Amino acid sequence: MSNSDREEFHGSSHTHSGSSGHHSSHSHSDSRSHHGSHSHHHRYRGPRSSQPEGLSDEYMTALTEDALRSSRELENQLLEEEKAFAEAVSRSIEAQTGENTGEQAGSPGGDRGNSEESDSTGCFGKRPGKGKKHRDSFTRAKRRKKILIRILLGIVLLLLLLVGTFFWLRYMGENNLKKNIVETPVEVVVPEEVAEEVEEEDNENLVVYNGERYWYNEDVITVLCIGVDREEFSSPDDMVIGGNGQADADVLVIFDKKNGKISFLNISRDCMVDLDRYNIQGQYLDTVKEQLCLSFAFGNGQQTSCENTALSVSRLLYGIPINAYVAIDFNSIGTLNDAVGGVSVPVTEDIAHLFPGTTVGALVNLVGSEAVTYVRTRDTELLDSNNTRMARQKQYILAFLRKALEQIKEDPTKALALFNSVSDNMVTSIKLSEVTYFGTFFAQHGFKEENLTSLQGEVVLGEDDFAQFIPDEKALFETVLNLFYEKE
């Protein structure tokens, strides 16, 4: 029997009895040490910087410089046009004044009988002369010109304000993420499979493995994305141990600012981890070795469930900190899918029967609930059905990201729009400023298919008749080094 979706996990007082591999159950007091029983301790995480280095990205700096340069060019152009217009009007007035002077000189100036007509039509008579009209016209045009300049400068200043606000949100997003850690990183024990290749170092940022020196990358930000097997989240007031849903899909997104790279680590829901269990009152019971999906069940169905899952993932990855989390329910998948106009993916053999009229390998554009069907369906009678589903989920994630990236590049606000579209079906620690940071990072750096990986290991049938994914400890250790450390 495989690890099918268990609606209830009966075991608030259950203790784990015998799991495959070298892992063993332990109490809360010793949950800070795990991944084997070897006594060789080493901490694989350096202290996080409390402040980011700042916004030094050339792309964003150039954006502000372009706006300032455009403002100066516009102002200079308007001033040149105003100057040329003033000179043209001045020449027109001078020419007209010359004509009037010539007409007056040709008239019988000594004839007093014509004085009344002269007074009524002259420059200082009751009716203004042509020169006065030109001066009034010039004054009105100049006033309109100044108003136009003020309006245009106001628009430019508004754009600069928007850019400045964008910078501020992006900076605050990065700053908050670097300071935020879902759970204090734990001390770990070097797994037996690699203990002989690891040298002890006093600097907790440094790991020496097989003679190579690896330094912890402090410019990495992690976000745990959780797909919950519920159509909607439970209310925190309706907390039922084992009945608040499970972490059906778990993907750790890794933003590496130093190298301008985004990586995705897909972790099996059946992966055996150290998880904390709580009673109905939310009081800690014990720490046991169980499937990762159950970490979510031991919480209030919202924040504490997400935090408990993040803690289990951090322990699995030798204490790597989790900076943020986002959990979505089934309804969100179709919403996000349709928000980018549908996602085209190849039909796989295991679900071809769900898409009549298609052949294996043919592309199908998923709409609405079809996206849920594609990423969630599996044959629970097969032991490794979740691995098959994860391969299909990888195809969907890549296709969705490609389409979303195109739209975000055209419209930077698209990331925020996607985030808001599922806000009613989501539990997250991410704030508006952090969405801005992630969106711009994604638009600037994109992603590569080879940066979406899954943990290596084997699936076995546990004593409880549910599937268990046992990670390859050596491969896991090297994956952590590759994703979170830099070789000297």
Image (cartoon, helix red, strand yellow):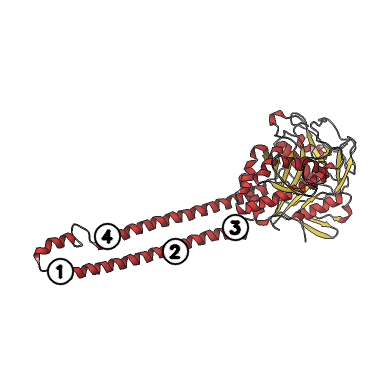
Classed neighbour count for the residue bearing mark 3: other residues with Cα under 10 Å, few (<14), some (14–19), many (≥20): some
Mark yes or no: residue 384 visible. yes
Q: Please state the horizontal and vertical placement of residue 156, each as a whole percent of the image.
A: 49, 55
Report, in whole angstroms, how far the alpha carbon at label 3 lies from the one at label 2.
Answer: 26 Å
Q: Is residue 224 above or below residue 284?
A: below
Image mark for residue 60 = 3
First-in-chain label (2 vs 1): 2
State the residue at coordinates (48%, 63%): 73
The tag earlier along the polypeptide, 4 or 3, is 3
Q: Position of residue 130 (x, y in %)?
A: 25, 62
Disc 1 to disc 3, how far (Cα)? 71 Å
Q: Within the image, what quadrant is residue 236 found in?
A: top right
Tell me which numbered mark, 4 or 1, is placed earlier along the sequence: 1
| Helix, strand or loop under label 1 | loop
- Name the mark on residue 107: 1
Q: Circle 4 sits on which residue?
A: 133
